[in-house]
């Protein structure tokens, strides 16, 4: 087993204390790259596995297959039906999580040192040899159908589904990854085996391990977890442009408070201006009470309980999004304030003071993220997915500090566009109508 | 094939080992809990007040939460918003929360910023300055918060109705965020009189968790909090208690926005009391046995596996409460099953549970999971901080918190049966149906 040892220690910008994370990069006998942090003070291990692709790999006409498949991984495998498998897991006090996202599926496992062999064997069985028994399919399908029906009465989900459909059309990003009542009802056992085959491809795997385990134990453990998975998966979806022009879409819904999802095209994660945009978003709407949108919409005017904005760089498209909820009587005013601020920041920019405050916050906050086994496992798998080297942890605050006021305000001018901002509003907003 | 593994945890692993927790009381009556975790150079600094929505004056529901918002405004020494801005400028985050029995404020920041956090938190314990503009704007904000959390959510509206029926006489029947008509009338005097009485060191608990030295924390606490005088008129915490319930209560909540009908059965239940946590511990097992995991609980097996009666079943109990709490069971019927049939199936499970012996293997499995959850809990120092803060503001002691895992460990089948007999009594029940229409509520 090849092993590169990288020890990373970094100094808190805002403090004299030193956080030290020692990341070991291993390659297993089967060729899987794993990032490991040993932490022997608590007798458990956290494993994070992420496979790129996700629900966007749903085959045509099989929307919802990946989502349903992931919900069924813990519902029977090997010689165990769902109840036997779960009783086994409960007796080990292990916790397994299986999630499906647009661009990935993830497996999160947490198990005790004292029975780690049994827990790993059980998880390996679930990942490599799922059964997709018909009774389990029917039971979980009924739960998924309930979720889909609930979404149709949930203002936030109504807004999201309409927004993404208008922005991305026929691309997988344009439809709910749970599927529709029709598509989910039509899914067969065969479809689920196919979705399993497609979603779990070794070439698209990132793995991190944190906890009470040694490097020698990690390799065989990971190899056993993925022993039966396919080497590669089907082609990923094509790139898609954000296709929603500026304007307002009102979807009438009888509820006292309107909710709005708003956004425009964003910026790629690997764009050289990404850090400038990231800082800009922090100032605009990313950092809670300190953000411009919170100050203008909540603190000054009391129009909402919360408003935020987010950079969303997906694998095949990028968005700059925001969300807010306001009483029906004042949603129109909220939208005016947001649009005005979007325009002001695009033209006037932000101040040196705002930039400095955001940098201090971001550089001070970063080391605080590394405060638990689970958090470190999540961070490490995220870095691998983005193709970042281990040294990124050391350099990340330098990237933040290197951004100048000119950079931020140039990016504001180039990207923020109040005329391109589209609001999807669900509720009975007074004085607000659909417009392009 | 079902294989059973013998689980023997050789060591009893407490969440934070006892030697990692240090406690003391300042001369002015402020309690202090220090939890050491030196894995990362981070500290969580919290101040908990033993005052929540259930301590509010009649007619002023929501004032405890309203005041929580207003505590981020100006003081004699800070501008409005300065505390949060300062925390952010130091790379930290801060927030606050209000419940029935407590209001708590916290910051999470690099460990060497602790003195600054204490200085600011101590300042706003005594020196708040509010303007009429603060009151007007922030009242709009809490009304929008109510819109978001409650009025836009049929399940939250239903829960509000259920609690108001469950608690006829106790303030737990009034929502934490407040009834809208009373929130709309909250004013400066309401906020300040709550503040002046309750925001005092002898009504507060300081919890500091993370990369800190208990002796240094003590010196800092003396310096910043120790100088604040105690409130001599702090009232004893006496609330109207529930009378014995002698008749089952029922309600049906209809809201067009409900897509999946469901029912909730709620029983008044004892909470964890200082020195007497055994019944509460048994109820933790009871909730797991009846509705913990759909794959192994009685309701899950009977309604989701053996029959296709429900798409969801669950049972819930939390012993963390100053006064009587609730034990609840929820069932969402399958597509072609009525609420009435689902309720009958649920009742049959309860009847069978009371009539039969409990499978000892199930108790052992739950015991193992509760032990393991204590090990996993050590990975989250904020969770441990919350555990102590909530306990001390709800009538428990540090000793009670540290005894709890052992009490859970020692629960027997007989204890669980006795707790079930005590709590699962029809005459003490409230049953709520939630549906989109009268037709669906059958």
Image (cartoon, coloured by chain):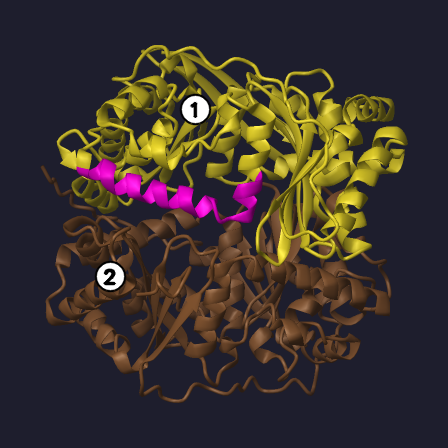
Chain colours: A yellow, B brown
Which label is found at residue A73?
none
Which label is found at residue A54?
1
**What's the residue at 20%, 50% (across, down)?**
B308
Name the chain letter of the residue that bears numbered label 2.
B
Q: Nearer the viewer, residue B152 or B304?
A: B152
Q: Magenta region's main secondary structure?
A: helix
Write down the region rendered in magenta: A135-159
Q: Decide if residue A249 is on the left or right side of residue B317.
A: right
Instruction: Relative to A25, say whether B197 is above or below.
Output: below
* Coordinates of residue A341 in the picture (x, y in percent): 82, 39
**What's the residue at 58%, 87% (across, down)?**
B236
Q: Nearer the viewer, residue A278 or A163?
A: A163
State the image quarter where residue A403 is shown: top right
Q: Quadrant of the N terminus of chain B?
A: top left
**What's the residue at 52%, 85% (across, down)?**
B239
Q: Is residue A236 visible?
A: yes
Asked whether residue A145 is drawn in magenta, I would say yes
Q: Nearer the viewer, residue A425 or B144?
A: A425
Q: Is residue B70 visible?
A: no
* Coordinates of residue B370 in the picture (x, y in percent): 31, 55
Q: Decide if residue B1 is on the left or right side of residue A226.
A: left
Q: Mark 2 — residue?
A: B290
**What's the residue at 79%, 39% (across, down)?**
A339
* Coordinates of residue A213 in the picture (x, y in percent): 36, 30
Q: Nearer the viewer, residue A269 or A296?
A: A296
Instruction: Relative to B429, say whether A135 is above or below.
Output: above
State the image quarter where residue B340 is shown: bottom left
Q: Residues within 10 Å of mark 1 (few under 14, many from 20)?
A: many
Name the chain letter of the residue that bears numbered label 1.
A
């Amino acid at each position: 087993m090849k092993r590169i040892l990288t020890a990373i220690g970094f100094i808190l910008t805002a403090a004299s204390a030193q956080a030290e994370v020692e990341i070991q990069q291993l390659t297993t006998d089967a060729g899987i790259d794993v990032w490991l942090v040993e932490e022997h003070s608590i007798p458990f291990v956290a494993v994070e596995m992420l496979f790129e692709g996700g629900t966007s790999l749903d085959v045509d006409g099989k929307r919802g297959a990946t989502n349903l498949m992931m919900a069924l991984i813990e519902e029977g495998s090997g010689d165990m039906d769902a109840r036997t498998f779960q009783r086994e897991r409960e007796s080990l006090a292990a916790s397994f999580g299986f999630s499906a996202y647009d661009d990935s599926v993830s497996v999160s496992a947490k198990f005790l040192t004292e029975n780690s062999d049994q827990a790993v064997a059980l998880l390996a069985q679930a990942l490599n040899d799922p059964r997709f028994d018909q009774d389990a399919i029917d039971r979980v399908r009924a739960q998924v159908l309930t979720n889909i029906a609930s979404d149709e009465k949930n203002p936030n989900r109504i807004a999201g589904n309409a927004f993404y459909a208008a922005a991305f059309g026929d691309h997988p990003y344009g439809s709910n990854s749970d599927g529709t009542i029709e598509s989910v009802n039509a899914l067969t056992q065969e479809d689920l085996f196919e979705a399993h085959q497609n979603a779990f491809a070794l070439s698209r795997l990132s793995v991190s391990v944190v906890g009470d385990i040694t490097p020698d134990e990690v390799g065989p453990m990971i190899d056993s977890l993925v022993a039966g998975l396919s080497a590669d998966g089907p082609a990923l979806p094509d790139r898609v442009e954000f296709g929603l022009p500026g304007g307002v879409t009102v979807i009438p819904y009888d509820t006292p408070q309107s909710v709005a999802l708003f956004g425009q095209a964003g910026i790629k994660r690997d764009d050289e201006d990404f850090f400038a945009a990231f800082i800009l978003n922090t100032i605009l709407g990313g950092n809670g009470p300190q953000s411009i949108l919170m100050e203008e919409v909540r603190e000054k005017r009391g129009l909402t309980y919360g408003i935020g904005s987010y950079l969303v760089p997906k694998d095949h498209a990028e968005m700059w999004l925001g969300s807010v909820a306001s009483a029906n009587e004042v949603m129109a005013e909220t939208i005016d304030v947001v649009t005005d601020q979007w325009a002001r920041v695009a033209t006037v920019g932000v101040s040196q003071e705002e930039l400095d405050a955001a940098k201090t916050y971001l550089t001070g906050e970063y080391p605080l993220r590394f405060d638990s086994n689970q958090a470190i496992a999540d961070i490490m798998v995220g870095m691998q997915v983005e193709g970042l080297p281990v040294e990124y942890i050391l350099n990340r605050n330098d990237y933040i500090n290197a951004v100048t006021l000119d950079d931020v305000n140039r990016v504001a001018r180039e990207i923020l566009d109040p005329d391109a901002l589209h609001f999807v509003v669900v509720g009975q907003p007074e004085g607000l109508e659909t417009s392009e | 094939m079902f294989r059973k593994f013998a689980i023997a945890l050789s060591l009893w692993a407490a969440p934070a080992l006892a030697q990692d927790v240090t406690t003391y009381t300042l001369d002015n009556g402020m309690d202090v809990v220090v939890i050491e975790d030196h894995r990362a150079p981070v500290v969580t600094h919290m101040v908990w007040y033993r005052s929540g929505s259930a301590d509010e004056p009649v007619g002023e529901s929501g004032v405890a939460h309203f005041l929580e918002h207003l505590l981020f405004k100006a003081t004699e020494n800070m501008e409005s918003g300065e505390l949060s801005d300062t925390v952010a400028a130091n790379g930290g985050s801060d927030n606050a929360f209000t419940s029935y029995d407590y209001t708590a404020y916290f910051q999470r920041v690099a460990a060497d910023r602790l003195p600054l956090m204490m200085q600011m938190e101590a300042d706003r314990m005594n020196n708040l300055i509010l303007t009429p503009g603060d009151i007007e704007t922030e009242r709009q904000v809490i009304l929008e918060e109510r819109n978001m959390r409650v009025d836009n959510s049929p399940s939250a509206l239903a829960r509000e109705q259920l609690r108001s029926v469950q608690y006829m006489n106790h303030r737990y029947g009034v929502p934490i965020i407040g009834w809208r008509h009373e929130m709309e009338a909250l004013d400066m005097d309401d906020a300040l009189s709550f503040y002046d009485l309750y925001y005092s060191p002898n009504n507060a608990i300081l919890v500091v968790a993370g990369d800190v030295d208990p002796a240094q924390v003590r010196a800092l606490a003396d310096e910043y909090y120790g100088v604040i005088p105690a409130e001599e008129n702090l009232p004893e915490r006496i609330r109207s208690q529930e009378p014995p319930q002698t008749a089952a209560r029922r309600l049906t909540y209809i809201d067009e926005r409900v897509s999946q009908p469901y029912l909730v059965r709620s029983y008044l239940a004892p909470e964890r009391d200082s020195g007497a946590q055994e019944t509460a511990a048994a109820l933790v097992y009871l909730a797991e046995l009846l509705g913990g995991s759909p794959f192994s609980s009685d309701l899950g097996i009977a309604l989701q596996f053996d029959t296709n009666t429900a798409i969801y079943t669950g049972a819930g109990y939390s012993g963390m409460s100053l006064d009587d709490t609730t034990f609840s069971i929820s069932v969402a019927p399958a597509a072609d099953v009525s609420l009435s049939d689902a309720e009958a199936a649920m009742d049959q499970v309860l009847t069978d549970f009371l009539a039969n012996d409990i499978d000892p293997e199930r108790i052992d499995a739950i015991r193992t999971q509760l032990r393991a959850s204590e090990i996993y809990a050590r990975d989250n120092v904020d969770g441990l901080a919350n555990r102590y803060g909530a306990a001390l503001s709800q009538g428990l002691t540090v000793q009670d918190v540290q005894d709890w895992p052992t009490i859970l460990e020692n629960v027997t089948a007989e204890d669980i049966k006795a707790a079930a007999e005590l709590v699962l009594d029809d005459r003490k029940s409230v049953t709520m149906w939630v549906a989109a229409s009268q037709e669906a509520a059958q």
